[in-house]
Amino acid sequence: MKLSAESFRQRFPSLGRKVHLASCSLGARSTDLDDALDAMLDDMAGGSAPWDRFEDRLHQARARFATLIGATPEQIAVLPNASVGAFQIASTVDWSTRPKVVTAAFEFPSVGHIWLAQRPRGAQVVYADTAGQYADLIDERTRLVSAPMTGYHYGERFPVADIARIAHDAGAEIFVDAYQAVGTESVDVTELGCDYLVAGTMKYLVGLPGLAFLYVREPESTEREPSLTGWFGRVNPFAFDPKSLDFAADATRFETGTPSVPAAYAAEAGLRLMADVDLAAVREHVLGLTDQAIERLAAQGERVNVLPRERRGAHIGLHTGDPAGLAKRLAEQGIAVSARADVVRLAFHYYNNTDDLDVLCAALAAESVSQSPRSDHESSGRFNVHS
């Protein structure tokens, strides 16, 4: 039987003392995470070298992530972060005949900077200001299309499957950043039709920083071998042959050196926990909380970023003149949020409930009273609508 939202919340005892609305940046701490790190320490304290147990946790995490997104373990590479995942793909591309990269104007820099760094190799980067602009920009010169499944800024969900069809019709491949989506909704790489997908474990998969997964639909079909490599990318890493550069046939060819062991233990624990929930129920739970948050915050006079329900991810943007300052003041009251650019991001997960929203609304109401009166411009609109 799958966990209910209340049963899931009970795995995060710290939420009885504070409000965590920053899962878009870092997930809350669970008892499963604590148990995993204790297990790692126990493994280290054993009578023999623990490397076989470390490796087993890594294999388990790889397999669990593959199951989560409808892939096979052979299609998954374990990497330290999303930037390395994007670079590994960019490094295999020959940009000489089809130099164009179509990406989103609000692509997270972890991915977007990798595309820009390919310009000395001939890549030409163009930006879609909206999801609808992809169709206008993709053409016969396009080699790679990059789209976030959910944008990190305003939490907008992109029609990735539609963009993938357009890309493939033009003979291009598509790279998907699903970091802000996995753990909050069902993600199936076959349904998306993507060639590559990257995601990490520290946000809605309730793990730690230091581990990411790269899905590659056809690992051996790239134009070039990855230019960043290491011993984990070999056919047999334990051959210890520094004079041989053979690449594995599966997605491990994109791996580099020894991964973060604590992050691997945490990833396996977080993915095991997420396997115990119905992701469709998670999606509905999160949408219900964002519905209430938008309504209640707007009623208080807050400026909230509003997206249609079907295009809304797990976080919403609260517009304020001082995002970092507001985030700091809320943190002092035990409310964790995440500031980015012009908004404070309010992220909801399966462990959040209406009690969290009550505390947030009360804190923001008190904040409004304590601050100087708003200007006419600031108070003129309740919503900031993105169509």
Image (spheres, rainbow, N blue to C red):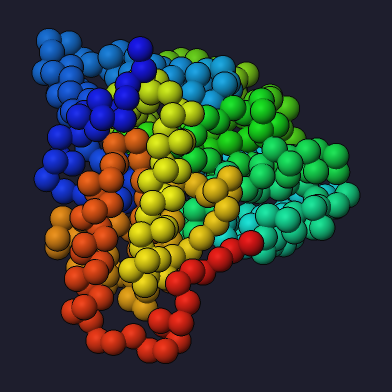
Q: In this view, does 355 lie to the left or right of 69?
A: left
Point 63% across, 35% down: residue: 196
Point 38% across, 23% down: residue: 277
Residue 255 visible (yes or no) = no
Question: Which sits in the foreground, 333 or 246?
Answer: 333
Q: In this view, does 290 lie to the left or right of 95?
A: left
Tell me where residue 217 appears, x and y as whole percent. 66, 26
Tell me where residue 97 appears, x and y as whole percent. 85, 49
Q: Quadrant of residue 61?
A: top left
Point 40% across, 66% down: residue: 298
Point 78% across, 43% down: residue: 167
Tell me where residue 293 appears, x and y as whole percent. 37, 55
Seen as rendered, the residue at the extreme right is: 140
Compared to residue 354, the image places residue 154 above or below, namely: below
Q: In which quarter of the image is the N terminus?
A: top left
Total labels: the figure holds 0
Q: In which quarter of the image is the C terminus?
A: bottom right
Residue 311 visible (yes or no) = yes
Tell me where residue 370 appears, x and y as whole percent. 18, 79
Q: Is residue 253 left or right of residue 182?
A: right
Compared to residue 348, the image places residue 105 above or below, namely: below
